[in-house]
Image (cartoon, rainbow, N blue to C red):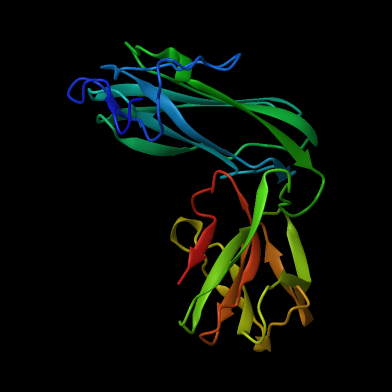
């Protein structure tokens, strides 16, 4: 067996570290094989596609879909075309040109706002192209997305894992998550699940008008509450708070006892969705 071995030339190719025993006298299971790639000179790649499995219908759905591209080659690339095409319930297409990307560098691409006023299933296809690309098979990713008739951004549980977040031994810090929606609504009740007991917390509602759509203007702050093992803390707002479009819900941990705000992690984790401080 070959243990702790490296395949490929580290100067001219990518390094493949073997972290398991590789024996040449073992046959591959049916339908499986090893495929080794040397590092190309020109190789642009879609590293990750950020697509919500479910989105709320709206006439302007910006920042729902984005893509991260990476130059996997050994040379700098220029004039890279990145395209998002939506077909099905709604249609949209846009190509953004990235002027240059050095070897090993990556970049997240945000596309323009687009209409998803029709509910139903749609295909979201990302593609990338550059002159001289030596490995085009990694240039396209397709995702399926459901446009819901809900007025808020729902999240599918199909690919979620449950966990809890908070701060160990630190007081007066908070987490904020972005809520997506359309039109003007009034918030009269907030329900947040906790997995802790007697952690003191406060709930906030904030606009998304900070620089780069981060949490901005404070709209409402609740009185302080103690969490319990009842799973959900239900906070009723006596005077409903009006929000327009997207906004943030924040939970502030007032003491040093970890609040364990129960959350569902979607993979991949989208940039600009979760803030702490």
Observer-nearest of 140 and 244: 140
User: x%, y% of residue 133?
Assistant: 35, 13
> Which corner quadrant holds the N terminus?
top left
Compared to residue 201, the image places residue 118 above or below, namely above
User: x%, y% of residue 136?
Assistant: 43, 13
> Which corner quadrant holds the C terminus?
bottom left
Observer-nearest of 59 and 187: 187
User: x%, y% of residue 40?
Assistant: 29, 17
Q: Residue at x 50, y 14 (%)?
A: 27
Side (left or right) of 119 relative to 167 = right
The residue sitting at the left extreme is: 11
Compared to residue 79, the image places residue 136 above or below, namely above
Q: Residue at x 45, y 56 (%)?
A: 212
Side (left or right) of 92 relative to 209 = right
Using the rendered image of the protein, determine whether residue 246 is visible from the camera's viewpoint: no
Compared to residue 134, the image places residue 166 above or below, namely below
Q: Quadrant of residue 62?
A: top right
Using the rendered image of the protein, determine whether residue 228 is visible from the camera's viewpoint: yes
């Amino acid at each position: 067996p070959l243990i702790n071995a490296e395949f490929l030339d580290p100067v001219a190719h990518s390094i493949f570290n073997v972290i398991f025993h590789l024996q040449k006298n073992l046959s591959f299971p049916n339908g499986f094989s090893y495929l080794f790639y040397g590092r190309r000179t020109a190789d642009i790649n879609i590293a990750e596609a950020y697509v919500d499995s479910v989105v709320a219908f709206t006439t302007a759905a910006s920042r729902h879909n984005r893509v991260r591209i990476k130059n996997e080659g050994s040379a700098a690339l220029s004039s890279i075309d990145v395209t998002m095409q939506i077909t099905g319930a709604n249609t949209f297409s846009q190509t953004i040109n990235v002027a240059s990307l050095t070897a090993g560098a990556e970049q997240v691409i945000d596309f323009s706002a687009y209409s998803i006023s029709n509910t139903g299933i749609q295909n979201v296809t990302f593609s990338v192209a550059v002159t001289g690309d030596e490995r085009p098979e990694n240039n396209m990713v397709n995702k399926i997305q459901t446009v819901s008739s809900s007025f808020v951004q729902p999240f599918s549980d199909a690919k979620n894992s449950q966990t809890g977040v908070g701060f160990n031994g630190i007081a007066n810090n908070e987490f904020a998550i972005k809520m997506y929606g359309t039109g003007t609504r009034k918030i009269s009740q907030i329900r947040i699940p906790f997995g802790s007991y007697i952690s003191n917390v406060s709930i906030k509602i904030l606009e998304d008008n900070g620089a780069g759509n981060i949490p901005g203007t404070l709209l409402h702050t609740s009185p302080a509450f103690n969490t319990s093992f009842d799973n959900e803390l239900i906070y009723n707002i006596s005077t409903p708070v009006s929000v327009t479009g997207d906004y943030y819900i924040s939970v502030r941990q007032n003491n040093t006892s970890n609040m364990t705000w129960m959350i569902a992690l979607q993979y991949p984790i989208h940039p600009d969705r979760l803030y702490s401080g």
